[in-house]
Amino acid sequence: MMDNVSKLTIFTLSGLHEIANYRVTLFVLTLLCYCVIWLINLAIIVTIIMDKSLHEPMYIFLCNLCINGLYGTAGFYPKFLIDLLSTFHVISYAGCLLQGFVLHSSACADFSILVLMAYDRYVAICRPLVYHSVMTTQRVCVFIFFAWLIPLYLVFMSSITTARSRLCGSHIPKIYCINFLVGKLACTTSIANVIIPAFNYTFYFLHVMFIAWSYMYLIRKCLISSENRSKFMQTCLPHLICLIIVVVSLLFDLLYMRFGSQALSQNVKNFMAMEFLLVPPIINPLIYGFKLTQIRNRIIQFLSGKRI
């Protein structure tokens, strides 16, 4: 029996049976939402790539943040749209692991890129005289390389340990797959399945602590200079808002997944599961697009038919 259950090929997903009566409406709204995510993120990406005056560290990091938003949502929305029109909500074993890998690595890459943006603002405001010698093109490329490599590697190792587990169930109590829920189906818990996720959580918790420390230092620095206050409001405030949105969205899902009440309606559960795939990919580029003058002006010029 144990050999049979450890060779599962299909998982069942939950949360969509209650919406059968209005799934077409949800399909249209979800498709519209996904199109909006692509439109606004792609607008920021193309604007930064095409305009050489925006080839600066802050904008390069922002471009990667938008690319990561598209990467993460691509791991969820296409499958979710198919499920909305289907009466059977299943996913293959390989597809489940792949979806979990994409969603986890995207969330981790968000924090890696936000750390780089915080460090960039710290150097720009607190050490302006050495900014260009510290944030060189070569160093920025190295930063970006590791901002993608480290999350992909850490989540890959976590996915490998999950894939090696012997499973005693096939039901995922969520509208998408993540490693934590697949790991809960394991017949036994290995040391690696505990240590690797614990290390990953600790590693990215330290990311949040670094960002918090850098912003406390920045705020203290900006209080004594009107010029620094202007810089903070123009470039740091959007980043701080984006960080809060990402952290709150992920915490909602993480805390509910581990400590949530079964008394909540299925619609509320679905919204909490989707929040970090819905709010940050839309709000983040909008905040930067409206707040950063250079990007806003370039997009307006493009929409009005003027040359960038």
Image (spheres, rainbow, N blue to C red):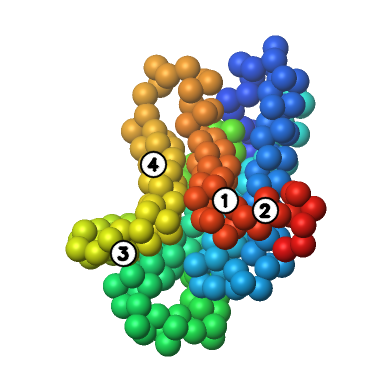
- Give the CA distance from mark 1 to mark 4: 21 Å
Residue type pointed to by label 1: Gly
Please tell me which residue lies in front, 258 or 296.
296
Say which of marks 3 and 1 sits in front.
3
Helix, strand or loop at disc 4? helix
The reply, left or right, for residue 185 in relation to residue 308 is left
Residue highlighted by disc 1: 289
Residue highlighted by disc 2: 299
Residue 290 image position (x, y, % from top left): 54, 47
Residue 287 image position (x, y, % from top left): 51, 47
Identify which residue is drawn at 35% across, 74% down: 123
Say which of marks 4 and 2 sits in front.
2
Q: Which mark is residue 228?
A: 3
Q: Which mark is residue 248?
A: 4
Q: Would you call the spot at circle 1 few (<14 residues within 10 Å), some (14-19), or many (20 or more)?
A: many
- Give the CA distance from mark 3 to mark 2: 26 Å
Residues marked 1 and 4 touching at CB (< 8 Å) = no
